[in-house]
Amino acid sequence: MNPAVEDYLKMIYEFESDRKDQYVKNARLAEQFGYTIQSINEMIKRLKGMGLVEYKPYRGVRLTDKGRKEALKLVRAHRIWEVFLSDKLGLPWEALHDEAEKLEHAVSEAVLERLYAFLGRPEYCNHGNPIPDQTGHMAPTYKKSLFSSSVGETVVIKRVVDYKPLLNHLNKLDLSLNDQVRILEKDTFAKLIKVDKNGELITISQTIAETIYVTQD
Amino acid sequence: MNPAVEDYLKMIYEFESDRKDQYVKNARLAEQFGYTIQSINEMIKRLKGMGLVEYKPYRGVRLTDKGRKEALKLVRAHRIWEVFLSDKLGLPWEALHDEAEKLEHAVSEAVLERLYAFLGRPEYCNHGNPIPDQTGHMAPTYKKSLFSSSVGETVVIKRVVDYKPLLNHLNKLDLSLNDQVRILEKDTFAKLIKVDKNGELITISQTIAETIYVTQD
DNA sequence: ATAAAAGATAAGGTCTACCTTAATATATGG
DNA sequence: CCATATATTAAGGTAGACCTTATCTTTTAT
């Protein structure tokens, strides 16, 4: 279980859970990693040999139970490190992902459990993604997007997609996790949504508002 | 600067500073890593190509300033992680080394500086080794061994060699960093030293007592 | 139904960091 | 000062994880 293998498992896991694809296409992995499809194919064979994925030509790849278990460990490590980096070291949220990406491969389960306890067993990371426990269970994922909210509603930002350019953009808009906003106006033609945050008017494009998840307050 | 290269630099650094060898012999590196001399030779050539070491056949290898700077970064990262693992997560000292070994390669300088500040800028790690600052400067290394102390002296344990079997042995003897002991008896023929720790009589072999460093109280 | 697009496989290449076996050079001790 | 032990170099090999070019197969869309 080296870092390369681990990265593949995590990526496949994220695709599976993200869009509920039955099978993840090799081409999508290639695109995401920036590798050629041939490299992906080779690696998939290796993963299959290790019993971590099942693979159907022209269909794609899917995690086995064993593979999913491994992927969850990584997701868990990643999110726990994000909480540490943010809560204890004060790293800005756009920097968390890349640093956690390195740390997640560098820690034994024993240390991870201690770190988890040290952080107070958080349920969510600093982008609002749930942290699986040792058995793989996790709190629900917020699924209601900001753009799907109705005018007049007051909502709280609970999850954002962990993608650096997006996070930088949200910084510019002065939007963070747990911010409360009220929907003032939604223009489905102009593809814009206008919200109020403590008297401040913030205009957000539909594309961006669809990557922000909220709860009704 | 991949992990393999980093491990070599750190090892060479440790040999250089440990025994003040002018040049580190390839064979010693081979022995320490458990690799063949040929592998060492290849890697040394790579390191030389990167300008990290100078190499004289039949003499050995020595860090260049650039190499030493890199090695110090690693030593620093290693020791800072040890403090974190011990002070914040409560890991026993015999487990620190192996975990820190993985973490030291997985962290950017920016995060390391934040971690260092979070820990209160410690001067020494939990085996008593000094932590270099960003410029490479560090507090003095304790050099007086327990075995070199005289009968009747009261000393404090300030540094131990970071070697797991030794640390396990010290655990069994109930000896830790910052323990105060009084030398009761030193038998250079039997190669034993007897000390008193809070009324407890502890017998230590010369070999072990030479890996424990103290200050006079 | 078939052509174009998408996907898979095959063959051969690179680089890193290891390995082994064999030949050669140097150092040093008697 | 020369033999032996030690150290170095050379040549060729492996596995992992990537690459390219070229061929072949399946899906899907008209």
Image (cartoon, coloured by chain):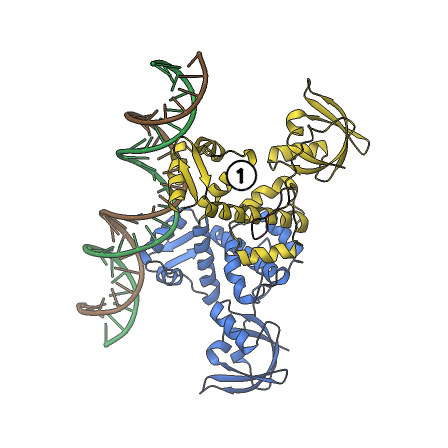
Chain colours: A yellow, B blue, C green, D brown
Query: Could you tell me which quadrant the C terminus of chain B lies in?
Result: bottom right
| Image vertical order of residue A181 relative to residue B164, above or below | above
Instruction: Give the SS element for disc 1.
Output: helix
Of D4 and A208, the residue lying toward us: A208
| Image vertical order of residue B179 relative to residue A31, above or below | below
Query: Looking at the image, can residue B108 be seen?
Result: no
Q: Residues within 10 Å of mark 1 (few under 14, many from 20)?
A: some
- Magenta stretch holds residue A185: no
User: Which x, y percent locates residue B202?
Assistant: 55, 83
Which image quarter: residue A64? Answer: top left
User: Which x, y percent locates residue A167?
Assistant: 64, 35
| Image vertical order of residue A206 relative to residue B7, above or below | above
| Image vertical order of residue D5 relative to residue B120, above or below | below
Count of marks, rendered view: 1
- Magenta stretch holds residue A131: yes
Of A107 and D23, the residue lying toward us: D23
Q: Could you tell me the amino acid type at mark 1?
A: Glu
User: Which x, y percent locates residue A35?
Assistant: 44, 34
Residue drawn at 41 percent across, 32 percent down: A36
Residue drawn at 53 percent across, 39 percent down: A14
Chain that bears disc 1: A
User: Which x, y percent locates residue B61?
Assistant: 39, 57
Residue drawn at 72 percent across, 35 percent down: A175
- Dominant SS of magenta comes to loop
Tell me: B204 left or right of B110: left
Of B13 and A137, the residue lying toward us: A137
Q: Which residues are magenta?
A: A130-137
Which residue is disc 1 drawn over?
Answer: A14
Tell me: A213 left or right of B5: right
Of A200 and A123, the residue lying toward us: A123
Tell me: D5 left or right of B149: left
Query: Looking at the image, can residue B126 be seen?
Result: yes
